[in-house]
Image (spheres, helix red, strand yellow):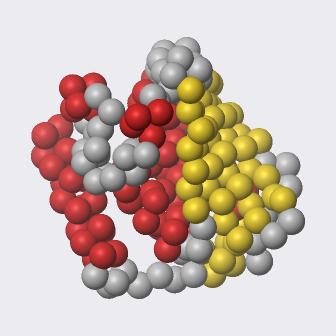
Amino acid sequence: LEETDRLTRLVDGLLTLARADAGRVPLDRKPEDLRSLCHEVTECLRVLAEEKRQTLALSAAQPALAEVDRKFLRQALINIVANAIRFTPAQGAIQIDLSRNGTHATIAVRDNGPGIAAEHQARLFERFYRVDRSRSQETGGTGLGLAIARWAVEANGGRIELDSTPGRGSCFRIVLPCV
């Protein structure tokens, strides 16, 4: 069952990216409350963090509206937060911060995990790229999650950024124009 689930995720990811490459993914962009979306994703993934005795916290003091396809942006955020949970050690911390700065909203996902070496950061969003192939297969990763996240964010008019220091953790930021 686990192998079937892994293969299903792999095929679904490949289909999403193939359709995106062909321009055949219809987006349903509407003004969405990013605070609500962040809360939804946090609650959805909280059980995974609890299994590893991790802290998963959300800070979203102010509302932020962006014109996005909620389904695809939700998937991007889930992929990023799930990776933070997967690679942060037991009893670690993952923090999601939503902020608004003028015309843009930023969703930052910070962790105190192992961080990512500089030589891997440029390729991290490539399909099938894995920093540590053996560790990724142990945890069920397909190497498509961040490629899908980047596509989804860019398709919604945004960008995705990464700051990471080995031994100190990572911060993935989704930056979107506000409405």
Provide residue 89's location: percent of width, then percent of height. 47, 18
In-front residue for pair 53/93: 93
In this picture, residue 173 sits left or right of residue 147: right
Q: Please give the name of the residue rendered at 48% of the width and 15% of the height, measured from the top-left corner.
A: 90
Q: Is residue 80 above or below residue 33?
A: above
Q: Is residue 96 above or below residue 24?
A: above
Q: Is residue 40 above or below residue 59?
A: below
Q: Please give the name of the residue rendered at 53% of the width and 17% of the height, measured from the top-left corner.
A: 167
Q: Please give the name of the residue rendered at 48% of the width and 50% of the height, measured from the top-left corner.
A: 78
Q: Quadrant of residue 34?
A: bottom right
Q: Quadrant of residue 171?
A: top right
Q: Please give the name of the residue rendered at 15% of the width and 49% of the height, measured from the top-left corner.
A: 7
Q: In which quadrant will I find the N terminus?
A: top left
Count of marks, rendered view: 0
Question: Looking at the image, can residue 43 be seen?
Answer: no
Provide residue 28's location: percent of width, then percent of height. 51, 83
Provide residue 65's location: percent of width, then percent of height. 75, 70
Provide residue 10's location: percent of width, then percent of height. 21, 53
Question: Looking at the image, can residue 7 be seen?
Answer: yes
In-front residue for pair 19/118: 118
In this picture, residue 19 sits left or right of residue 41: left
